Image (tube, rainbow, N blue to C red):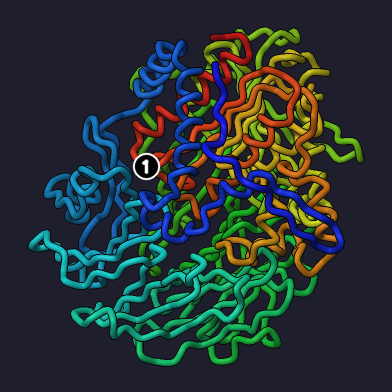
Amino acid sequence: MSEPTPALAHPPLVRTVHGVTLSDPHAWLRAENWREVMRDPSLLAPDIRQWLEAENAATEAWFGPLADLRRDLVKEMRGRIKEDDSSVPATDGPYAYFTRFREGGQHPLICRRPAGAVAGETILLDGDALAEGKAYFQFGDAHQSPDHALYAWTADEAGSEYYTLRVRDIASGADLPDVIDETTGDVLWSADGAYLFYIRRDPEHRPSFVYRHLLGSDPADDMLIYEEPDKGFFVSLGQTQSGRFGLISCGDHDTSETWLIDRHDPLAPLALVEPRAPGLRYGVEHHPDLNGTESLIIETNADGAEDFKIVATPLATPGRGNWREIVPHKPGRLILSVAVLRGHLLRLEREDGLPRLVVRALADGSEHAVAFAEEAYSLGFDAGYGFDKTEIRFTYASMTTPTEVWDYDVASLARVLRKRQEVPSGHDPARYVTRRLLAPAADGELVPVSLLYAKDTPLDGTAPCLLYGYGAYGISIPASFSTSRLSLVDRGFVYAIAHIRGGTEKGWRWYREGKLAAKTNTFHDFIAAGEHLMREKIVAPDRIVAHGGSAGGMLMGAVANLRPDLFAGIVAEVPFVDVLNTMLDDTLPLTPPEWPEWGNPISDAEAFAHIRSYSPYDNVSAQDYPAIFALAGLTDPRVTYWEPAKWVARLRATKTDNRPLLLRTNMEAGHGGAAGRFDRLEETAQVYAFALTIAGEA
């Protein structure tokens, strides 16, 4: 197979930073008009487009002999999907809202019907119809108006995360003239339904400006009510469970700040809860009458509560000096999220790597937990609509157990199974095993590893393995159910998730020890997980395919440089591999907000040296590499397309082996890949076909 070459010769970009000369031979792949390309991909420079399309053609040629396998995989995965599936309706006053798919449909239908009824459906938005004729379509945020007459909805039609906000009149099915372009997708109603709040991005694509729109007025006249002064802070919109306040949440990875919008008085000035302070993080809920006082309930890391505690404070004087502890800090027990009902405080927490839902009665402080017995599982909850109630909804799954949706009464402890995920082609959990191992890292830490494999898979050191990792931003990877990965497991693969440092599986410390100057712990933890699986003869030493995306794609690039001998193959989806150059470019959307995670190499010579020491693109060397499959999205604002493109170009020019090196750029999508649910299966099938081939199972 002939390999792609640049359409034109381009000189390297040479510059000096902190006394170090940097030469970037593939900098030309970065489109200078990238902002315009985000909006209109046709504006990409012809020579860059030619190079990307040549790579795509070469990748398709490599996959050509695997066409039957890819079709089989798609057929299998699609056979496990209930095509006319629907969500469990969520009741809000007189109506129950839900989403469903039609047989063969790619996109969801957003619907409602009268509360308590099984008939009388109204389709509010038809995703398939709205997506017709478009290369990309993805719903964003969507909310009914308080009187249930209107439906505010947003959609992205390029994959660039610019969402258009529209308002649908439910009775007529037509959208109002109010159309607001290039929002972030967040939307909030005032309590009287007269106003909408939304967010716009700055020229560098950062969510920075909160506007108030009077329904029926010209969006050009909308009022700017909040402007974020710090380029490193992102802004989002939310709402308290009580419905009283909208929340403007500002923050980066270390620090947060919250402003209150009074939904009952939308023209009133914003109210600041607690001014931002370096390292202080907090989230806000509201209670109208907590022990006789209108109060805010706050989860926070204040006062050294690294794994968070919960406090209350009077609404009239919300500052930190008045915070009174409700749930104390317990090291190693990470509080993940909090919700408040009139009589109960709910918290999702994780300890020893496993989540549990804890319910606290506000009247007397008594608590009970909802927990499960499997070695590894995922758990989430949703307080739904309303405040004066005792019923919530939680979801449970494990790597062998399909997702279950339960309604749970926090007062009576009664639970009702509302839905169990159907697998039309059949699924017998007894055929599979899920386990959790602890892999010793070089510094003595024990890295949790979740496993899924078929019961008849021999664990004698011959099994192939797909080893997944992420390890950044404090994000934990749940041991949840996936119908797609069964296509690997049924072919003898061990599917493994390495819960490496950089996540919060073992508390906030686990995250702290995988960022900034400690970032390389993430890479060594992942390597330790692979070595442990081999040492325990669970998998074959020459049949491990590593898989990660975004920041996990950076992990893939790093371990490919550090231990290329450990992996037969690497799958890097939208990989953040050009870390040094990206962190040196403060015009890019995510660069200032990312400095607390990686360090600021512009102002900090030590951070520059540390990032330079591991940045995958900068550490490609003349050595043999595993087979590599990289995936990118042309309109991706999070990991720009040129990061994987430059990485592949440097690998192609430098590595000493002749193993496959493949790049596929989705020319019509962004960070999340294809938007349609069956189109996504095509992408998954391509990844799995690569893994099966490289591991010798195709």
Above or below: residue 61 compared with residue 95? above
Looking at the image, residue 384 lies above or below residue 670: below
Q: Residue at x 22, y 67 (%)?
A: 167
| In the image, residue 662 above or below residue 581 | above
Q: How many marks?
A: 1
At numbered mark 1, what does the secondary structure look like: helix, strand or loop?
A: loop
The answer to whether residue 275 is left or right of residue 524 is: left
Residue bearing mark 1: 675
Q: Residue at x 78, y 14 (%)?
A: 537
Q: Name the one closer to the observer, 307 or 539.
A: 539
Question: Residue 130, image x and y in percent?
Answer: 21, 49
Q: Residue at x 62, y 57 (%)?
A: 336
The front one of 547 and 511 is 547
- Indicate the amino acid at tag 1: Ala
Q: Position of residue 464 (x, y in %)?
A: 66, 14
Q: Residue extending furthest right?
A: 443
